[in-house]
Amino acid sequence: VDYPNPANADKKLTQPTFEASVFLDVPLLNRVAGGRRDAAEANLDRIREQARFTQDRVVADVRDAISALTLSRERVDVVRKEVAVAEELAVVEMKRFELGDSTLLLVNLREIAAGEARVKEVDALADFYKAEAAFRAATAAGVAPPGSARG
């Protein structure tokens, strides 16, 4: 056991002793403000992502509308050619019938084919106008119908 030496006790009392302490005070208002800032930044990031998603969706909608419009315009052109050929065949078949080289059944079949081609034309035009409406909705731009001076 080591007992304190009274002679050394005087030395400890005469030596200067330094004590220091640090007090860190973070006010509650600063923490609340920082939390609000973090929440606002997170909200801003969410809004940016929503805007990017919306922009991507609009681009996709415009591309889809352009594709549908192009295809429907091509379909209208093809069906109009089909109508012209079917009507011409019906007229020729009627002339052949008048000359005695055909039957009434063939004339009727040609006329039915011409009528069906006209129905296809109406369907193709309806699809075109639907595609045009989708394009206008996606871009707010005007489009001329097929066969018009602007189209």
Image (cartoon, rainbow, N blue to C red):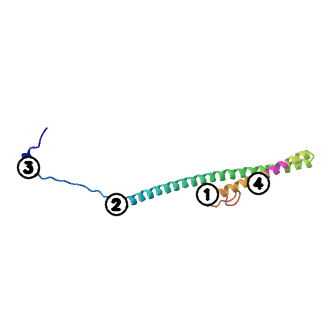
Q: Quadrant of the N terminus?
A: top left
Dot in front, 2 or 1: 2
Q: Earlier in the sequence, mark 4 or mark 3?
A: 3
- Residue type, mark 2 in image: Pro
**How much space separates mark 4 and mark 2, taking CA atoms?**
75 Å
Q: Nearer the viewer, mark 2 or mark 3?
A: 3
Q: Is residue 115 in the magenta section?
A: yes
- Which residue lies at the image location 8% right of the left edge and 49% below the top edge? 10
The answer to whether mark 2 and mark 3 are in CB contact below 8 A is no
Distance from label 2 to label 1 (Cα)? 52 Å
Q: CA distance from mark 2 to mark 3?
A: 45 Å
Secondary structure mostly seen in magenta is helix
Of circles 4 and 1, which is in front? Answer: 1
Q: Nearer the viewer, residue 130 or 43?
A: 43
Image coordinates for residue 128, horizontal then vertical, percent: 70, 54
Tell me the distance, in whole angstroms, between the alpha carbons under discs 4 and 3.
Answer: 116 Å
Judge the density around disc 3: few (<14), some (14-19), many (≥20) Cα neighbours within 10 Å: few
Q: Residue at x 64, y 61 (%)?
A: 142
Of the residues shown, which amino acid type is indicated by label 1? Ala
> Tag on residue 10?
3
Q: Which residue is mark 4?
A: 122
> Which residue of the protein is positioned furthest toward the top in this rendering?
1
